[in-house]
Amino acid sequence: MKEENRIPARRPKIRKNHIRFRLVFFVGIALMLMLVAIFAEYLCPYDPNAQDYSVSLQTPSLLHPAGTDSYGRDMLSRILMGLHTSILATLALVMIITLTGTAIGVICGYWGGLMDALVMRISDLFLAFPGLVFALAIAAILNGGLSSAVLALAVISWPKYARLARSQTLAQKSMPYIWAARLAGDTAGQIIFRHILPNSMGPILVTAMLDIGTMMMELAGLSYLGLGAQPPVAELGNMMSGGRSMLQTYPWVVIGPGVAIFVAVVIFNLLGDTVRDYLDPRNI
């Protein structure tokens, strides 16, 4: 009877250990992918922009494991540089929208008033349009380019973080420990940075982790449509766009970058799901 009572008590601990193991595993995999992206220039077996028409559109081989494109450029080298461009641009984008949206949301939630109402109505305006369509319009106005694509996606993505940070701030500022901090003489800045932000970052961090894969797909989509990174810059989306007419005859030109996007997005999505499970209070 005693042994039967111990089994249910062990299950939460076993589940927590399992989630912790998954977190360490996926953090390690994501770090490896990021290191590959950061040091892609040194890992490329060939110059990713070097053209050699004598070896154009060669099938995958020992010399060119991912084949070559129509200009004779090594596909593996270009995929590695495409990961470099896509991942670093995505991480920069997620950092921008997370910091900007969180700052706006905390300020609006803490002070409220006219500024809060105005900013929330502006966020409603941005959320009223389909996100990718709005991003396409902004990127087209800015004449394309990777920086324009990042800016366009940042413009449409910050309201989600602003609303999340605002709701967390409204919930936190009515807590007894906030009143105690005010009675102790803490300034608004001290309350925000010492109490509200540390207790609100869990949901914001989870949202940011889950957004990495989404933002990577949207950046690749803008590049595929010609409104993101422009040739000869190696970026996974524009590499797929450049080879789409050869999908049936020379499929490796499209499949290689597509597989790279798929692997990167899956890794970051699994990491985001694991971070969400790890920070879930029910799993503590």
Image (spheres, rainbow, N blue to C red):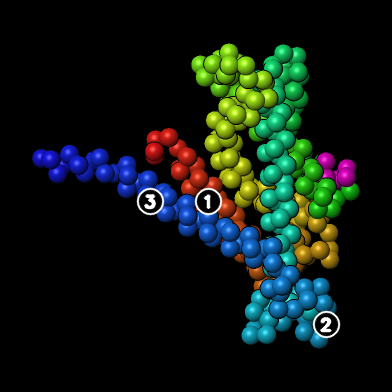
* Horizontal arrangement in the rendering, residue 81 relative to residue 143 (left or right): left
Quadrant location of the C terminus in the rendered image: top left
* Horizontal arrangement in the rendering, residue 147 relative to residue 34 (left or right): right
Q: Please identify the quarter of the rendering in which residue 51 is found.
A: bottom right
Between residue 84 and residue 57, name the one nearer to us: 84
Disc 3 crowd rating (10 Å Cα; few below 14, some 14-19, many 20+) is few
Residue 217: horizontal and vertical position, in percent? 67, 51
Residue 53: horizontal and vertical position, in percent? 83, 82
Residue type of the residue flagged with mark 1:
Leu
Q: Which residue occupies 64% across, 66% down?
A: 36
With respect to residue 54, does 175 lie above or below? Answer: above
Query: Distance of mark 3 from mark 1, alpha carbons?
Result: 14 Å
Q: Secondary structure at mark 2?
A: helix
Disc 1 crowd rating (10 Å Cα; few below 14, some 14-19, many 20+) is many
Q: Please identify the quarter of the rendering in which residue 163 is found.
A: top right
The magenta region covers: 138-142
Residue type of the residue flagged with mark 3:
His
Q: Earlier in the sequence, mark 3 or mark 2?
A: 3
Q: Secondary structure at mark 1?
A: helix
Q: Residue under circle 2? A: 53
Q: Which residue occupies 76% across, 51% down?
A: 222
Q: Earlier in the sequence, mark 3 or mark 1?
A: 3
Q: Residue under circle 1? A: 271
Q: Residue under circle 3? A: 18
Residue 79: horizontal and vertical position, in percent? 70, 68
Q: Which residue occupies 20% across, 42% down?
A: 6
